[in-house]
Amino acid sequence: MSSADMKTITVIGSGLIGRSWAMVFVSGGYSVKIYDNQPGQSAKAITEISKQLGELEEARMLRGKLSATQQLALLSSYDDLAQALEGAFFVQESVFEQLEVKQSIFQDIERLVGTDVILSSSTSCLVPSNVFSRVQNRSRCLVSHPVNPPYYVKLVELVPHPETAANVMDNTHALMTKVGQVPVLLKKEIDGFALNRVQAAIIAESWRLVQDGIVSVRDIDLVMSEGLGMRYAFIGPMETMHLNAPEGLEDYMKRYGEGITRLLKSFGPVPDFCGEGAKSVVNEMCELIPSDEQHLSARKERRDKLLMCLAKLKKDH
């Protein structure tokens, strides 16, 4: 397939993640065909995207070099899978997290596209060897796992199937970079990928510290938002260690490795997140932010606005 042919991307599923992917891809100048098996849903998605693009343009946070009107013109909606896939060089599946559904949709997609079309899944918790188990040619399959919301949080984890060809990983990495995402390459598949494994470690210790009466829900969140998160917004844990000792990472481990090992050995078992003991943690959280739709929606809106500001700051630096 020549570079001239590599202009159309199909997004399967028109929910939050599907819409976000569509916005990311059109910001890079690609034509995007949105497919949803529920009649009319993909057309509704474009109406929603149109509203968002207008708001982003007004806030001067629109990504890419094209205007909102130009980006909107690159979008089209489909209820028919074959029509939606026609002419695409890359397919990004974003249906809900159910293995059977994903396996089935990729089986259908493979029958309708050429052998050189890249098949990518947005799954956040299913490994590629399971997602693509019904696909015949698995060398062109991978997971491209975004972080919610992908428009402001640019990381995308690229996870290969054991049979994925190296050039498929390279081409997807190049595509994601071109549209302004920040791709990271996993060398092989693992449950939870990288982001969710690191996140699970933070969740587990935070939960234990609250449950064991060491610190409050409010204060453990401050440990991250006003402490670790401040530097992790720009540099990761490896660079943090490298910079925190006079002679770099090796020196850091000579100084602090023993203490870190001691702490890790003192960690308790994996907490019970749903039993009786978990209720006090949940109640404490709900006192700070009630779990009704009104309160949660307001906080999500606040989160997205703050992420927009942080994305702008990172862009300017």
Image: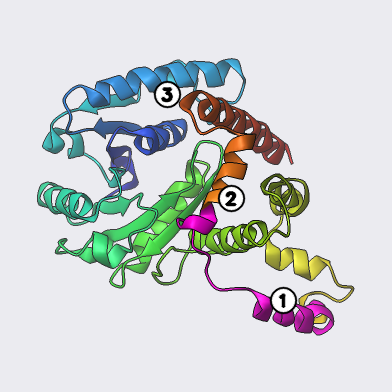
Please check the rendered image and state whether residue 277 is part of the magenta-colored stretch, yes or no.
Answer: yes
Q: Nearer the viewer, mark 3 or mark 2?
A: 2
Q: Looking at numbered disc 1 in the image, what kind of residue is underneath it?
A: Leu
Residue at left 68%, top 37%?
310
Please report whichever mark, 3 or 2, sits nearer to the chain's N-terminal start: 3
The amino acid at mark 3 is Gln
Residue receiving disc 1: 263
Residue on which the image places disc 3? 71
SS at circle 2: helix
Q: Say which label, 2 or 1, has the lower sequence index.
A: 1
The residue range painted magenta reads: 252-278
Which residue is denoted by mark 2 in the rendering?
281
Q: CA distance from mark 3 to mark 2?
A: 44 Å
Q: Magenta-highlighted stretch: main secondary structure? A: helix
Question: Which one is closest to the eye, mark 2 or mark 1?
Answer: 2
Q: Are marks 3 and 2 in contact (CB under 8 Å)?
A: no
Q: Position of residue 145 (x, y in %)?
A: 42, 52
* Left or right side of 89 for 145: right
For the residues marked 2 and 1, what is the alpha-carbon distance in whole angstroms? Answer: 23 Å
Q: Amino acid at mark 2?
A: Val
Vertical order, 21 against 72 (above or below): below
Graded by Cα atoms within 10 Å as few (under 14), some (14 to 19) or many (20 or more), the crowding at tag 2 reads some
Helix, strand or loop status at disc 1: helix
Task: Please tell me whether mark 1 or mark 3 is closer to you in this view.
Answer: 1
Circle 3: element type: helix
Disc 1 and disc 3: Cα gap in Å? 51 Å
Quarter of the rendering containing residue 228: bottom right
